Amino acid sequence: MGDNLSELGISAGKFNRHLGYGLSLWWMPATDEFGPRGGYGDWENHDKPATRFGASLAHHREDRYSDLSQNSPDNTSIRLSDASLLFGGGSLAPGVTVQQANFTLYAVDAGLKYKGLFFQGEYYFRTLDKFSADGILPLSSIKDNGFMIQVAGYPIKKKLELYAATSQVFGSFNNANEYLAGTNFYPFHTRNVRLNGQVIFVNRSPVSSVFGYYMGGQTGTTLSVAASILF
């Protein structure tokens, strides 16, 4: 339970009095576990199939968190499928600014790990509705949906992992997708230290990530190389 979907860059004095709610449930019927932290990839090399099934819900009445006279809202966490800001001026109608809206997200997911092989899939449904605006809007709700799938395997056990993934967004204002392939190298025989390289093909990105590789509306190829240490 919280007071906002994302508190990054928003002062406490701007929050409204609405509480948000989040809930996640998961079931691991095969082995009662899904690896440390439930992370991606089967570094542990399960000798029995490990499965996980889950469902999640998030809901909050979001606010613009800035005066209507400002064209750029402080709340930048909610974007339409064409990457424009829901609370930006004229996002849903010329000359009209949305001040508040309900955000609801449902998701279901499933995963499998077995002998170094890994599969993870998720499908989500997002609804934006109950708009409060300074003018007349041409619609009362916005419904988007999409999915993500990732597969991975270890050609060299506990040392070298190859993976591929795709995500698709079917939106009210735009369809977007991405395809990526990459590799993880574990030099010290531990999952907590890895070197990573990947290539991402993005087509009309619907988001701009605070931490990551995406810009709203981005179309093109991204190459990345990284090293990470988990404590």
Image (spheres, rainbow, N blue to C red):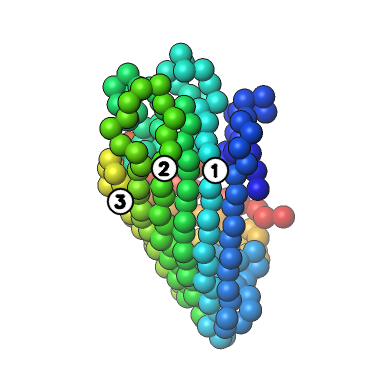
> Closer to us: mark 3 or mark 1?
1
Instruction: Count residues near mark 2 (Cα–Cα under 10 Å), then give few for <14, some for 14-19, many for 20+.
Output: many
Q: Nearer the viewer, residue 138 or 3?
A: 138
Distance (Cα) linking label 2 and label 3: 14 Å
Residue 191 image position (x, y, % from top left): 63, 64
- Which residue, given by chain and number where applicable, does mark 2 sit on? 128
- Which residue, given by chain and number where applicable, does mark 3 sit on? 170
Residue 157 image position (x, y, % from top left): 54, 75
Residue 148 image position (x, y, % from top left): 40, 59
Distance (Cα) linking label 3 and label 1: 22 Å
In the picture, residue 96 is in which quadrant?
A: top left
On-image quarter of the C terminus: bottom right
Amino acid carrying mark 1 in the image: His
Residue 10 image position (x, y, % from top left): 60, 28
Q: Earlier in the sequence, mark 3 or mark 1?
A: 1
Instruction: Count residues near mark 3 (Cα–Cα under 10 Å), then give few for <14, some for 14-19, many for 20+.
Output: some
Element at label 2: strand
Element at label 1: strand
Q: Earlier in the sequence, mark 2 or mark 3?
A: 2
- Which residue, given by chain and number where applicable, does mark 1 sit on? 60
Residue at point 58% right, 76% down? Answer: 28
Q: Is residue 194 visible?
A: yes
Relative horizontal placement of residue 119, taking residue 14 as reference (left or right): left
The tag on residue 220 is: none
Q: Is residue 210 visible?
A: no
